[in-house]
Image (spheres, helix red, strand yellow):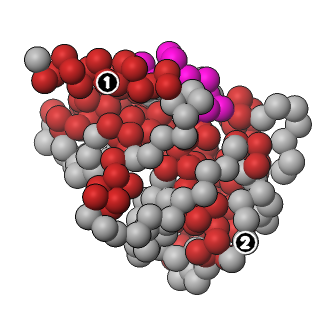
Amino acid sequence: MLIAAVIGLVLVLVPLYWVVPPVSTLMLSRYVTGQPVVREWRDIDQISDRLKTAVVLSEDGQFCSHHGVDVAALRAEIDNFLAGEEARGASTITMQVARNLFLWNDRSVIRKVLEVPLAVYIDLVLPKRRIMEIYLNIAEWGPSGQFGVAAGAEAAYGTSAENFTWQRAALLTVALPNPHVRRPGNPTAGLMSVAQIVEARARRFSANASCLFNGPAEL
């Protein structure tokens, strides 16, 4: 009965999130425990095209072409797991949205298995632009309860999310895996090096993010 209720809740919430700005499970847990949450929702067209491109090329280069799951990357991950090798990821942006909205952050096989059908359903119901819009507004992006790119940009640079140089867009992007340690406003040499790689990739393969733009991107 509990499982059916959870499935029913997901089936209802995902279509609702087409128009309602959602919050993540981590945001909810911080609200419940009295920890600060800073988030200002930004429509996708109010977010820097350079940042969107950098996020796609850093996090999920096939975002515009897959159906929620990168099958080839997932198959390789399963092969690594069966061979006893260390996991290397394979989470698409859509899978990360599924995790942030409905699951937990601790890495586990069970969580990964649940992410797959959730991501497929999210991709089936929501357009790519909305999936990215949700991702950019619920991702943890700062060390003190900042969620979403607007709060992340304000914490890092004291600026809004509309316009970034390529360098700032790349630095904000590479902070995503660990915003508690990686500080784009005061980057280490190592973080700068990774950001330069992401910037070069985003400039070269910007067409991979074309599904996110209505008309020519401002790059």
Residue 217 in percent (x, y) is at: 84, 42
Q: Residue at x 54, y 40 (%)?
A: 21
Please name the amino acid that badge 2 sits on: Thr
Whether the magenta-drawn stretch holds residue 122 is answered as yes
Image position of 75 (left or right of 38)? left
Q: Residues within 10 Å of mark 2 (few under 14, many from 20)?
A: some
Q: Which residues are magenta?
A: 121-131
- Indicate whether 125 appears above or below 160: above
Rendered image: mark on residue 9: 1
Is 113 on the left or on the right of 28, as rendered?
left
Q: Which residue is mark 2?
A: 159
Q: Reading the chain from its start, which is encountered first: label 2 or label 1?
A: 1
Q: Could you say where residue 94 lies in the image, as x and y percent from the top left?
A: 47, 33
| Residue 88 % position (x, y) | 32, 47
Kindly state the secondary structure of the residue where label 2 is placed: loop
The residue nearer to you, when weighing 37 against 165, is: 37
Quarter that holds the N terminus? top left
Task: Give the number of marks.
Answer: 2
The picture quadrant where one finds residue 144 is: bottom left
Which residue corresponds to the image point at 88% horizontal and 37% vertical from the top-left? 216
Q: Is residue 197 magenta?
A: no
Above or below: residue 122 compared with residue 48:
above
